[in-house]
Image (spheres, rainbow, N blue to C red):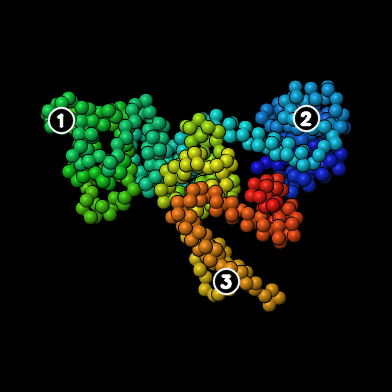
Amino acid sequence: MKPIWIVDDDHSIRFVLEKALAREQFAVRSFASAREVLAALDSEEPQVMVSDIRMPGGSGIDLLGKVKARLPGLPVIIMTAYSDLDSAVSAFQGGAFEYLPKPFDVPKAVELIRRAVEESLREEVRDTAAAPMPEMLGQAPAMQDVFRAIGRLSQSTVTVMITGESGSGKELVARALHKHSPRAGGPFVAINTAAIPKDLLESELFGHERGAFTGAQTMRRGRFEQADGGTLFLDEIGDMPFDLQTRLLRVLSDGQFYRVGGHQPLKSNVRVIAATHQNLEERVRAGSFREDLFHRLNVIRLRLPALRERREDIAMLTRFFLQKSAKELGVDAKRITNDALQRLMAFDFPGNVRQLENLCHWLTVMAPSQVVEAKDLPPELLAREDSMVRPVAGPAETARPAHTAAPSPVTQADPPTERPSLGSWLGDLQREARGLLEAGVPDVWDTLSRKFEGQLIHTALEVTRGRRIEAAQKLGIGRNTITRKIQELGLDD
């Protein structure tokens, strides 16, 4: 998140707000004049701006107008020690988010700034959601190679073979190849050869004449005819029956085919793009895929990387899919914390991009708040992560996730402290959860979450001897958050 900008010529005001916002884990930058702010806007932007009205070298109202001209959606809070009607009216007419008279109560000022930040984040989500949806996303080098290949092929109608694991986005690449080709004005027709029974696949591809077989009451055009002048995408080509491979090779060779039960040759003007998750070279060696068809399809090969090979794209894809799901469901898009994103980036996603998209749809429906935290991720993902915890040799050593670095050796000056192993409390949690689930207890998630949060906060308060702000800092949460949790969980009692 971008920093909060504080603009005031009074050093004490800047100092108080800086410290209060830092305690709430906000990044802050301070300015003593409007001139400094306008210079800084040339290279960066704030999340929220809090500005005094009367300052040497330019008023806050003038600054408000200039900033709003550059950043219309930026929430600006106007402060003033002169609480007069004209100042308030000028501030709101200039588009101020709120008017804050001095002297102010610091916790209330921080809460007002927090509301402005939430509004700013909502505006960012709306702006992103309103933007046109891109065809494909990817900053990883392997995806950039794919994008470059699509660009190079944009003036060609050559046959392309796309390889990659299931769910990696092969059809998206095929559609992009069609859209950016000379055939873009023609139809794009897709067929999954693995999803159609062998007895029906021939008719699906080539069509049939009336009476060609039982149930063929009318003539039907096949996918080759439907794609005439455009592109035919043959997904999972490696699963095509051997006898149909012969017919497909003939069409690719001379551009002619017959409908099932037909005697009149039909001409095909179709660009073929094929895709598979299988190793076709191995299938050729095994005799289950024709070598001549393989070479006919394998003119240009594009390999799509698995999602685990492009982890740097997971955060961007997650935000995109959350916006897409929200748009489809007609709800506000949810935001996701960095901690939750780190959990996702550590996950292998065997179902690739399709699995991530389905996960984001699940979060849009099931996550309890507008901000998705790590604890809101689906149980199977968290369970997979917990399963990575393994016991480490030695009675005093704590088990740790396989992907984390080993702890530093303990010196003689720092004797080891006996601590319960990570595996033991996870085992206790598993037994507790199993008992509640098997007993049919409702709301198991909420019950265990409340116990977990309550124990964490209780322990932190014991360590800090009841000092809430220090406890919140040690736990990595805000002061308002720990106060709210203490009230919700009844820890004041």
The mark found on residue 99 in the picture is 2
Residue 283 on image: x %, y %: 26, 52
Residue 285 on image: x %, y %: 24, 55
Is residue 109 shown left or right of residue 265? Answer: right
**Earlier along the polypeptide chain: callout 3 or callout 1?**
1
Q: Label 1's element?
A: loop
In the displayed image of the protein, which residue is found farthest to the bottom? Answer: 412
Res. 321 in view: no
Residue for point 61% across, 53% down: 453
The vertical placement of 360 against 386, above or below, is above
Measure the alpha-carbon separation of dots 3 and 1. 71 Å
Q: What amino acid type is highlighted by mark number 2?
A: Tyr
Residue in the foreground of this view, choosing between 69 and 369: 369
Label 3: few (<14), some (14–19) or many (≥20) C-alpha neighbours in 10 Å: some
Residue for point 74% across, 52% down: 469
Q: What amino acid type is highlighted by mark number 3?
A: Glu
Label 2: few (<14), some (14–19) or many (≥20) C-alpha neighbours in 10 Å: many
Q: Label 3's element?
A: loop
The mark found on residue 397 in the picture is 3
Q: Label 2's element?
A: strand
